[in-house]
Amino acid sequence: SDPVMWHDIFLTNRDAVLRILDAFRGDLDALRAAIDTGDGHHMLGVFTRARVAREHFSKILARRAYVDAMHSNDLIYLAQPGGTLSGQIRVPGDKSISHRSIMLGSLAEGTTEVEGFLEGEDALATLQAFRDMGVVIEGPQHGRVTIHGVGLHGLQAPPGPIYLGNSGTSMRLLSGLLAAQPFDTVLTGDASLSKRPMNRVAKPLREMGAVIETAAEGRPPLVIRGGQRLTGMRYEMPMASAQVKSSLLLAGLYAAGETAVTEPAPTRDHTERMLRGFGYPVAVHGSTATVESGHKLTATHIEVPADISSAAFFLVAASIAEGSELLLEHVGINPTRDGMLRVCRAMGADITLLNEQNSGGEPVADLLVRYTPSLSGTVIEGELIPTLIDEIPIIAVLAATANGTTVIRNAEELKVKESNRLDIMVNELTAMGVSLEGTDDGMIIEGGKPFHGAQIDSRLDHRIAMSFAIASLAAETPTEILRAGCVDISYPTFYQDLARLQA
């Protein structure tokens, strides 16, 4: 382009251009030194980040953060009623465990190998965050990830704000981990994440000495000031939340003294289990988990089990689609996550656990599920809710097909997920002719009556889109799901898998 124009640009922006040229020269000098000394680890980091950056730019243009968009958000999924599901399938890896494998693997000493990693938007947001903080991560390639850990004190300041897409788990857990780092960080997300409450994490972290700034009403972006000295504390959580518990335990790895978190009801304990898997001592007594600083994480091998939250859609599908018999392989059945199984069985579903075993500290099993011609309603409340909070949308679909009344209580947490899932499920099931009413903390569903298809708006919520894809199996007419591409967040091959199983 015009040489005079560039002459003017460089002279006018002299200081900025010199600063970038110095940074570029520094990068080249570091790469030259690595080649000269045979530092393969440094070169691997440079080339991995370069490749990911190039791919990242094209995905940003497609308005996806970290995965190639299988579909645009304008995708309409047309589901015909009926179908019989048969065969076997291994659904994608557990999202919660995938997040934590990246976090703890990055903070460990040595190289951690992960198999079964979920290559969805949310887990990849966590992976990219640690790449931004200088961790060399190879993959993912067919679910395999190699993490070259930097130790608890080896993270580097990111070059800019850390973008976490739609992942509330990433933002809440990273808040605790980053509160004790020596550098400042800014955590941002998409429009949906930017509406979600973060004070439930920020307030107790501030009590430990963290300096965290939020937007109005405690919402993102979060500005976390580095260089703070954290002090351990005993914290009784006002509401059950595995994300808050995990965030405080991660902060406790750096805090002086002990950090003890007591929860009012059991929540998923993947963080405690995985910390032990990396050799970090965690004491659990009743409802209280305790860590103290001064120990280290040692690299290990992790096999991520199939996500029971993703398997839930197929548990319901095979239970309500006449003649179905389906085997779901290597599903995580952690007792803090098995509420879905308990509810299905309470409603009369035919589910058999096969090949039960322990995989990397997590209990797993194959689930054989068969069509059940007569399901019955039940009551879902209290301590059961935290063990199936993400599965409630698909449970509502199951309840719509079951005879009698199903009551869901104490599920107000669903109002502040990716969308207001309670209100959406009530509104859209009503549009399909299901008899139900919403309550302040749940819903009451009168099931067992015929219902029809409808046009459903996913609101870009992956669990809403998948729930109504399954509901279509029992509807009398076709169902149209708008903005259906959001399944990429947790299950990029969901529609293909449904088709392969003959839905």
Image (cartoon, grey):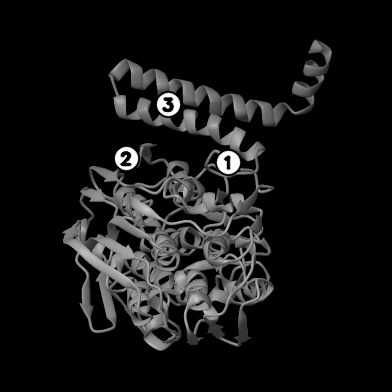
> Is residue 85 found left or right of 444 in the rendered image?
left
Residue 328 drawn at (x, y percent): 31, 57
Badge 2 is on which residue?
144
Q: Amino acid at mark 3?
A: Phe
Residue 110 drawn at (x, y percent): 23, 43
For image coordinates 36% across by 57% down, the residue present is 94
Q: Secondary structure at mark 3?
A: helix
Disc 3 crowd rating (10 Å Cα; few below 14, some 14-19, many 20+) is few
Depth check: give the residue in front, 144 or 328.
328
Of labels 1 and 2, earlier in sequence is 1
Q: Amino acid at mark 1?
A: Ala
Depth check: give the residue in front, 137 or 390.
390
Q: Which mark is residue 47?
A: 3
Of labels 3 and 2, earlier in sequence is 3
- Give the distance between the C-alpha atoms of the residues marked 1 and 2, in whole angstroms: 20 Å
Instruction: Name the mark nearer the viewer: 3 or 2.
Output: 2
Q: Are marks 3 and 2 in contact (CB under 8 Å)?
A: no
Q: Which mark is residue 69?
A: 1
Residue 196 drawn at (x, y percent): 60, 68
Q: Amino acid at mark 2?
A: Arg
Above/below status of 6 relative to 230: above
Depth check: give the residue in front, 309 or 246.
309
- Give the distance between the C-alpha atoms of the residues marked 1 and 3, in whole angstroms: 24 Å
Disc 1 crowd rating (10 Å Cα; few below 14, some 14-19, many 20+) is some
Of labels 1 and 3, earlier in sequence is 3
Instruction: Name the mark nearer the viewer: 1 or 3.
Output: 1
